Amino acid sequence: MGTDEAAQAFGDFLQSQRRLANISQRQLARASGVSDSYLSQVERGLYRPSAEVLKALAHAFEIPVSTMFTQSGLMDEAPEAEASPGIEAAIRHDTQLNAEQKAALLSVYRAFLNGPRGEPHTPLD
């Protein structure tokens, strides 16, 4: 993937994470300490953020830094087990769910990840 394609792919990822978290660019800027105009340019694929910015964004989204590094192309594919915290964070931050609903949804989600008898799920090809 070329640099422009990688920047666009990361911008798409960032925008989808922000929408999943149901926050505006301005809110993400405040939470991460990154300017909203810079975030806008990153989401449009105009810039590839530095490691420091990636770390700040990961902390703002409460997802592993390795996920941000992987999505930005700075690190090889993260193990499958590391993918779930982003989804789990989105569930925990969903304002439409109460605490009991969040706990139930997290339980079901984790059960789907762990196939029968607690074995890791293997995706079908």
Image: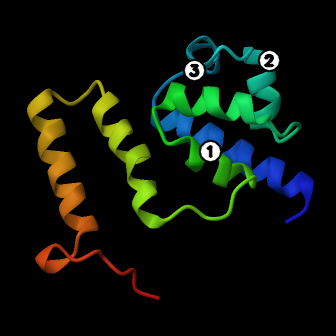
Measured as percent of width and height from the top left, residue 64 is found at 50, 42
Label at residue 37: 2
Q: Label 1 near label 2: C-beta < 8 Å?
A: no
User: Which residue sits at x=64%, y=16%?
Assistant: 29
Three-letter residue code for mark 2: Ser
Kind of residue at disc 3? Ser
Q: Nearer the viewer, mark 2 or mark 1?
A: 1
Answer above or below: position of 12 versus 57. Answer: below
Report the front residue among 13 and 79: 79
- In depth, the one of 101 and 61 nearer the eye is 61
Residue 23 x, y percent position in the rendering: 51, 23
Q: Which mark is residue 68?
A: 1
Dot 2, how many residues are within 10 Å of its Cα: few (below 14), some (14-19), or many (20+)?
few
For image coordinates 14% across by 40% down, the residue present is 103
Q: Secondary structure at mark 2?
A: helix
Which residue is more in the foreground, 76 or 30? 76
Q: Earlier in the sequence, mark 3 or mark 1?
A: 3
In the image, 45 versus 113, the foreground residue is 113
Image position of 54 with respect to 119: above or below: above
Q: Quadrant of residue 47?
A: top right
- Left or right, 92 with respect to 61, comes to left
Q: Earlier in the sequence, mark 2 or mark 1?
A: 2
Residue farthest along the bottom direction in this orientation = 125
Q: Is residue 107 left or right of residue 61?
A: left
Identify the element where label 1 is drawn: helix
Give the colour scheme shown. rainbow
Residue 1 percent location from the top left of the image:
85, 66
Which residue is under mark 3? 24
Q: CA distance from mark 3 to mark 1?
A: 19 Å
Disc 2 from disc 1: Cα separation: 20 Å
Q: Residue at x 15, y 51 (%)?
A: 107
